[in-house]
Amino acid sequence: MRLYFIKCKPVNNLTHAGSGKTYLAAFDVLNFNPKRLLYIVHEGSILMKSVETFQRVFGADKTYGVYNAEYKEFDADFVFSTNVTMANSLELFEPHAFDYIIIDDATCSILIQENGFETGQIAA
């Protein structure tokens, strides 16, 4: 399994909005080739933009699902969710249900503090 944090705090020139961090993550996913992906964000607008980015990179090769208050599409190859929805729904997912997990933006600061990860670390 791979865990990828995006923009936990400014560590490089790719941290500002619109700089391509989601595309960078999508290309790493393409290289890793996971069977299932979980993408977690803190805000709905980022969620939908992330889905669009991954659809551009992967096209019809994968299925995409949004899991939030409005949609419950958790059987897709790539699942995009908010941190609050996932925190309230963990019992629906097997512990090893995803091969690749992306934690985007502010969502990751708590995970880093609680689990001892370095900022921007990729845990393989």
Image: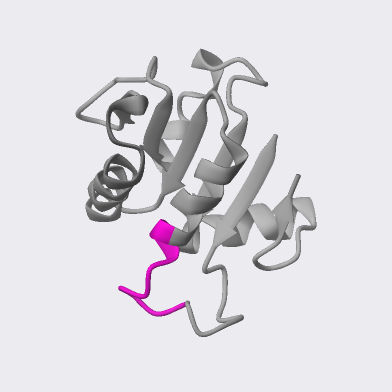
- The answer to whether residue 87 is visible is no
Question: Horizontal placement of 116 versus 3: left or right?
Answer: right
Q: Is residue 102 left or right of residue 63?
A: right
Give 46 or 69, whichever is nearer the viewer: 46
- Residue at 61% of width from left, 15% of height from top? 94
Residue 16 vs residue 70, the one in the foreground:
16
Q: Is residue 93 above or below residue 3?
A: above
Tell me which segment is drawn in magenta: 15-23
Question: With 32 as the anchor, is 51 left or right in this view?
Answer: left
Residue furthest toward the right? 116
Q: Is residue 8 visible?
A: yes
Colour mode?
Answer: one colour
Q: Quadrant of residue 55?
A: top left
In percent of width and height, residue 115 lies at 76, 51
Q: Position of residue 43 (x, y in %)?
A: 31, 53
Question: Residue at the location (75% across, 65% down)?
Answer: 118
1 to 72, vertically: above or below: below
The quarter of the picture where the N terminus appears is top right
Q: Examine the structure image and report whether residue 63 is included in the region drawn in magenta.
A: no
Q: Main secondary structure of the magenta part?
A: loop
